[in-house]
Image (tube, rainbow, N blue to C red):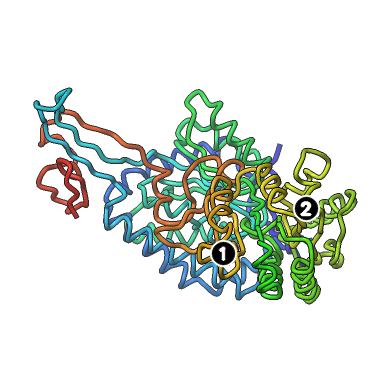
Amino acid sequence: MAAAPVWSVDPRTGKQREQVAVEATAQEVDAAVRSAHEARGALADRAVRSAFLRSAAEELQAAKDGLVETADAETALGPVRLTGELARTCYQLRAFADIVDEGAFLDVVINHPDDTATPPIPDLRRYKVPLGVVAVYSASNFPFAFSVAGGDTASALAAGCPVVVKAHPDHPALSEYVAKVLRRAAARHDIPEGVLGLVHGFEAGVELIKHPLVSAAGFTGSIRGGRALFDAAAARPVPIPFHGELGSLNPVVVTEAAAAERAEAIGAGLAGSMTLGVGQFCVKPGLVLAPSGAAGDALLKSLTDAVSDTDAGVLLDHRMRDNFVAGVAERAQLPDVDSPVTPGAGGEHTVSAGFLTVPASRLAQEGEHDLLLEECFGPVTVVARYEDEAEVKAVLSRLPGNLTATVQLSEEEAAGEGSGAELLQELTPLAGRVLVNGWPTGVAVAPAQHHGGPYPATTSTSTSVGGTAIERWLRPVVYQNAPEALLPAELRDENPLGLPRRFNGRLER
């Protein structure tokens, strides 16, 4: 049987644009993984790795016009958004190059022998080494930042791990283009092009996670798809780490005092966050706990006005559009659910933003309204009106893990008066990032960032954004009583590489 063709599709019309590639066979996946495995040695030198990452950023920036045009044709996200995302991607590559140069990610710890300790301490020298080939599964909604050159790839290469990317079917032409650019950057440093493999097709993704030379995987996508791959990674004869971002409701709690103080601003801010990128952000606020009464009514009026002024938009593909239209219709039919601004089909190829309201009491106990506690991908949120703090706590106690959780506080509450601190304690177990008086859309690439959370937000405790994302692709190893001449340079007493380290209990920078 001939391999199925891979087409670039215009989401604005649903029509095929061009054939980009064919779906990879099991043999082609095997060849890509083996080529990546053979390229490991080319990444062994940290100076080469950091130079490669900087060159990748340079090459991507140089190809900006063509990349943005290709991305917009396949995603309809618009040149402004895509140009910004490409700039973020280039910044992230350079940031990881800086991390590689610094060397602190190696976590070097050296203990000389100490016979006076109980029990005695032998000569111990610990650092981290790359796992091996990493499989990366691209996301649909961030064609640059969470795709071929995105955070998983950048952090894996920074760790010294070659990568094989499973391209997302929503932007196959862009995936090929970006891979070509990265391989051009690799060639500038005599790194084999196999250091970055690219395969297309559902079955190719399954073959990739099963390949014995794949040592870890990173995934961003749906709960269903991510869980299937997660289970496959665990079921291998040799299980591997699977770092998956699967889904998030990103709850928001608005206190009564905050709503009374600035209902209009909160409503407008919520509208902007939930409709940003046509609601296709993984940190879109999907559930808002807002007070009943006059303050809550004012918030809803502001939200209604702002969402009503939002233009219909195009989702990334027609499957997502169909799921969104069906999902909001099913939710809207539940008892006591109202639609102040009805979300759904905005046209043959577009969707309209909207929101639903429901009494919080409906979500405080198990039942058919549990559907409202599931992510609905697109420009919609659910506003649950609560009567008291007990209802807020009851709903929060039923939520799964999330990437983010947000609380909107009054000025006095933010200053430490009232229940602000208690609400933060309630939200902390639910999410990897807790926000106060802000909105979750927008994930800064910064050393302190954490983009992850309890399951199903992610399948591990790691982050996919920020400097510590590199830790996913490393493992510690200790040498005991190894002669100095046999040790890697990173672990020698004289520290020839000038690395930050902990030497006999003392931190050296």
How many residues crowd around disc 2 within 10 Å: few (fewer than 14), some, or many (20 or more)? few
Quick one: 238 or 183, which is closer to the camera? 238
> Which mark identifies residue 319?
2
Report x, y in % for residue 457: 59, 46
| Label 2 secondary element | helix
The image shows residue 391 at horizontal and vertical percentages of 72, 49
Relative to 484, 197 lies left or right? right
Neighbours of disc 1 within 10 Å: few (<14), some (14-19), many (20+): some
Instruction: Kindly tell me whether residue 492 is visible in this rendering.
Output: yes
Quarter placement of the C terminus: bottom left
Residue reaching furthest to the front: 417
Residue at image coords 49%, 28%: 239
Image height of 136 relative to 321, above or below: above
Q: Where does label 1 land, which residue?
A: 413
Q: Quadrant of the N terminus?
A: top right
Q: Do the residues labelled 2 and 1 touch (CB within 8 Å)?
A: no
Judged from the image, the secondary structure of the residue bearing numbered disc 1 is: helix
- Front-lying residue, 482 or 441: 441
> CA–CA distance between discs 2 and 1?
43 Å
Residue 151 appears left or right of 316:
left
Q: Which residue is drawn at 62% across and 56% down?
A: 282
Three-letter code, disc 2: Arg
Is 221 on the left or on the right of 461, as rendered? right
Going by the numbered disc 1, the residue's amino acid type is Glu
In the figure, 304 relative to 370: above or below?
Answer: below
Residue 304 located left or right of residue 53: right
Q: Residue at x 34, y 59 (%)?
A: 97
- Foreground pick, 267 / 146: 267
* Image disc number at residue 384: none
Q: Is residue 312 visible in the rendered structure shown here?
A: no
Q: Quadrant of residue 23?
A: top right
